[in-house]
Amino acid sequence: MLLAALVLSAACSDSESGMEPEEFGELGRGVIILCEGNFNAGNSTLSYYNPETREVENGVFRRANGGARLGDTGQSVSIHDGVAYVAMENSGVIWALDTATFKVKGKLEAGDTEHMINPRYIHFVSDGKAYVTDLYSPYITVFNPKTMQYVGSIPTRQEASGGYASTEEMHRWGNRVFVNCWSYSNKILVVDITKDEVTDEIVLDSWQPKSMVMDRRGKLWVVTDGGYSTGEDAFGDNVPHLYRIDAETLEVEQDQTLDVDEANVQLVVNPDSTWLYLINNDIYRMSITAPHVPVRPFIEAERGADGRRHYLYGIGVNPRNGELYVADAVDYRQSGVVYRYTAEGVLVDKFRVGITPNGFAFQ
């Protein structure tokens, strides 16, 4: 309790003075939505959605914690053992929040660790051990999610390129955790969780593996964004690829070229890991046994009055019923939109959240 009080006191030093903490009562099984905000604007927020009542509560972190700000550039949100963990990339912070109240339970800052700089994603190896990837650091940070204490660091031995030595999403198969290296890289790292050590790597032909999932057969699916072929910092060819990799042999079994993406490529799986959902401008659904991505999209992105396609920026699957939640950044300036679909792609609901929604966590 003392730790939580000290953490909240520090958070409220950058808050709205005089704002009383709000109590939300019984929330039920809902969806926590992370809204990234704008880089360097400090306007990241959390929203809460109740699927039963279709009610939306925006800005719940600020409201529950007396005006405290979540921070700058929210990257990911995940739930483990009744606690929501939010990685704030540009703030260098990981928050631990009570999922019933949204009140702060703990906090891990970059200054509390040896190598964490800009945290990206969290993977829970066990109740007492979690890994954190990073945008700039050539280390994976290890911490105890129960105490929010730093435990150690795993060197990735990745040389920085363009100032980045990034690691990104993580997925486990047996005692291996697979980690994609996104910025200016083409590698998938293999971490042995019994040793907390990188033991192998997979090199892809396409640049910047952006998102991954593991299917029920032990096949790792990886989508790259291909880099950036335009602008002063051109890198790669901007052509995304979808790979299937065997988690046991580390062999690449399938490689498919995708359409050039306008916003963000991302992969998720349905609850029994038999279907892939891929954001590649629109949303495509693909069986894990299919030889290639379907030609026609499963769900088409909305278009504005000018005919321009909205930027689909995130996707999540409710593990209880397979419903899809799709984050629409619209134009990255106004409040974003979340679409809720059945597992068969029928629109159930549509609602506004904060700026640039990018991730979902299901209670």
Image (tube, rainbow, N blue to C red):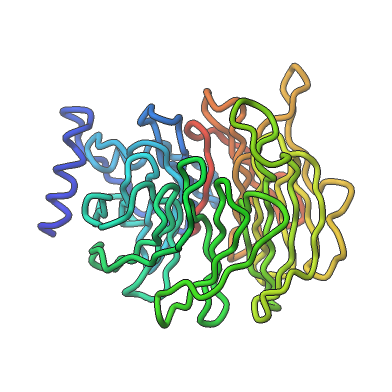
Against 279, is 335 above or below?
above
Which residue occupies the foreground of this view, 185 or 101? 185
Position of residue 144 measured from the top left corner of the image (x, y, whole percent)? 29, 68
Q: State the residue at coordinates (56%, 59%).
A: 180
Q: Is residue 233 left or right of residue 22?
A: right
Q: Using the rendered view, name the quadrant where residue 203 is placed.
A: bottom right
239 up-or-down from 174: above or below? above
Q: Quadrant of residue 12?
A: top left
Q: Find the residue positioned furthest to the top.
A: 306
Q: Quadrant of residue 2?
A: bottom left
Left or right of 334 in this view: 20: left
| Image location (x, y in percent) of residue 271 | 64, 67
Horizontal side, residue 32 vs residue 279: left or right = left
Residue sitting at x 21%, y 41%: 11
Pick the quarter of the image with the N terminus. bottom left
262 relative position to 123: left or right:
right
Give the answer, above or below, for where 207 lies relative to 307: below
Residue 177: x %, y % from top left? 52, 72
**Residue 70 image offset from top left, x and y in percent:** 32, 40
Q: Nearer the viewer, residue 46 or 255?
A: 255
Q: Nearer the viewer, residue 288 or 238?
A: 238
Residue at 52%, 63% in the rendered image: 170
Q: How many marks?
A: 0
Q: Residue furthest left?
A: 2
Q: Residue at x 45, y 29 (%)?
A: 38
